[in-house]
Image (spheres, rainbow, N blue to C red):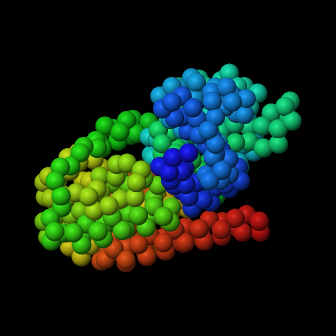
């Protein structure tokens, strides 16, 4: 196996490990250009090459999906904790993802099927990028599993984490009164709002340190699974008139070359970013809060439960639907954090380090609140 292939598989396994997905239940099939497949079970270093016939013998369900989806590059089979919990909900056949990133990256509904319904699974992947498979008692199977598609191993791994976050929101959201649906039109608008053009030319040397700070911040958030993808996640102030934001395209760790400069007043930028909700929100905050040096839109698991249920976390944290006017009103002049309905949470600070620390504190607080709810139920 080529070194590039090993590195890509290792990155996917590392991503799943950081997201607390048990690697002992992970299998990855990666289509190669010569018609063969890389097949990794539990450990990317033990990956082997298989022919189409060998794959069909080893993993008939996965082979059938890849055969029906010739444009798909990678298929991952895994079993995250909350996805397993969703399979224990009786009579649940599907549910609409309560978070916008799941709606965008997976599809309008998350389907649950029995493993004996093998004929249905390829059809599901014609419309969606993931599904949850319950075990078949007829076949003597002991545990369910999750299947996710992606163009690369890391992209498929990201979908596993986003699916797991949606499942967590469904389960733990019951502690907060239940999840609230997000409109599927939102994902369509978001897909159209974030093109990923090429940026020509290097970075000005005088701004290299600021670009590096943003790239470091994003890579740290990805490492800690506080976000799963980069687009729109972080803005860092450059000066009174500009801030920096990542294009967030590709699977490699962000470098300063992947960061663009945006004019606060007009949203003009040197990376071709369209005026998405995230871009306009960052600009509004930088314009209104002169002390804000960094703004993060976090997508962490526990705080996303509150976002899916459209609930405030505590008195110090605001809540707002995903509308710029509402967010600015919820932040006021003093609040540094705000839950965003069906999205995640917004955190701002006077430095990158300060904002990262607030992101971690917000997630810890959300975990404690959910744990307290569980203790209350148990009496």
Image location (x, y in percent) of residue 297: 38, 60
Marks counted in the figure total: 0
Residue 271 placement (x, y as % from top left): 20, 50
Q: Residue 351: x, y in percent?
A: 31, 77
21 and 345: which one is in front?
A: 21
Q: Is residue 120 above or below residue 5?
A: above
Residue at left 41%, top 64%? 219
The residue sitting at the front extreme is 2
Q: Position of residue 183 (x, y in %)?
A: 44, 38
> Residue 62's image quarter?
top right
Asked whether residue 248 is in view, the answer is: yes
Q: Is residue 310 visible?
A: no
Residue at left offset 57%, top offset 23%: 68
Which residue is rendered at x = 50% and y = 61% of the image?
A: 225
Q: Residue at x 69, y 36 (%)?
A: 133
Quadrant in the picture for the C terminus: bottom right
The quadrant of the picture occupied by the N terminus is top right
């Amino acid at each position: 196996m080529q070194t590039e292939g090993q590195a890509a598989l290792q990155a996917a396994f590392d991503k799943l490990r950081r997201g607390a997905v048990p690697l002992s239940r992970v299998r990855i099939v990666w289509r190669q250009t010569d018609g063969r497949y890389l097949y990794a079970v539990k450990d990317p270093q033990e990956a082997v090459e298989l022919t189409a016939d060998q794959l069909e013998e080893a993993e008939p369900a996965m082979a059938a999906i890849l055969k029906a989806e010739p444009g798909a590059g990678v298929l991952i089979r895994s079993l995250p904790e909350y996805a397993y919990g969703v399979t224990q909900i009786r009579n649940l056949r599907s549910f609409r993802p309560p978070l916008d990133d799941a709606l965008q990256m997976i599809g309008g509904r998350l389907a649950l099927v029995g493993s004996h319904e093998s004929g249905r699974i390829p059809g599901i992947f014609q419309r969606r990028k993931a599904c949850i498979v319950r075990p078949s008692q007829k076949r003597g199977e002991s545990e369910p599993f999750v299947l996710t598609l992606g163009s690369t191993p890391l992209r498929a791994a990201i979908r596993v984490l986003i699916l797991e976050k949606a499942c967590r929101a469904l389960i733990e959201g019951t502690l907060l009164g239940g999840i609230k649906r997000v409109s599927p039109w939102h994902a369509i608008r978001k897909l159209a709002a974030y093109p990923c053009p090429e940026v020509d030319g290097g970075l000005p040397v005088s701004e290299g340190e600021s670009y590096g700070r943003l790239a470091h911040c994003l890579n740290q958030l990805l490492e800690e699974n506080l976000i799963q993808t980069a687009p729109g996640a972080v803005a860092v102030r450059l000066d009174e008139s500009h801030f920096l934001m990542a294009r967030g395209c590709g699977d490699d760790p962000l470098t300063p070359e992947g960061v663009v400069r945006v004019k606060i007043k007009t949203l003009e930028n040197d990376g071709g970013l369209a005026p998405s909700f995230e871009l306009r929100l960052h600009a509004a905050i930088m314009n209104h809060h002169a002390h804000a040096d960094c703004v993060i839109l976090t997508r962490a698991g526990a705080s996303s439960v509150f976002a899916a249920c459209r609930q405030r976390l505590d008195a110090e944290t605001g809540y707002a639907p995903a509308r710029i006017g509402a967010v600015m009103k919820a932040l006021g002049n003093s609040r540094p954090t705000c839950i965003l309905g069906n999205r995640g949470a917004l955190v701002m600070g006077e430095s990158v380090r300060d904002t990262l620390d607030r992101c971690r504190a917000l997630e810890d607080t959300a975990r404690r609140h959910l744990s307290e709810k569980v203790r209350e139920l148990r009496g």
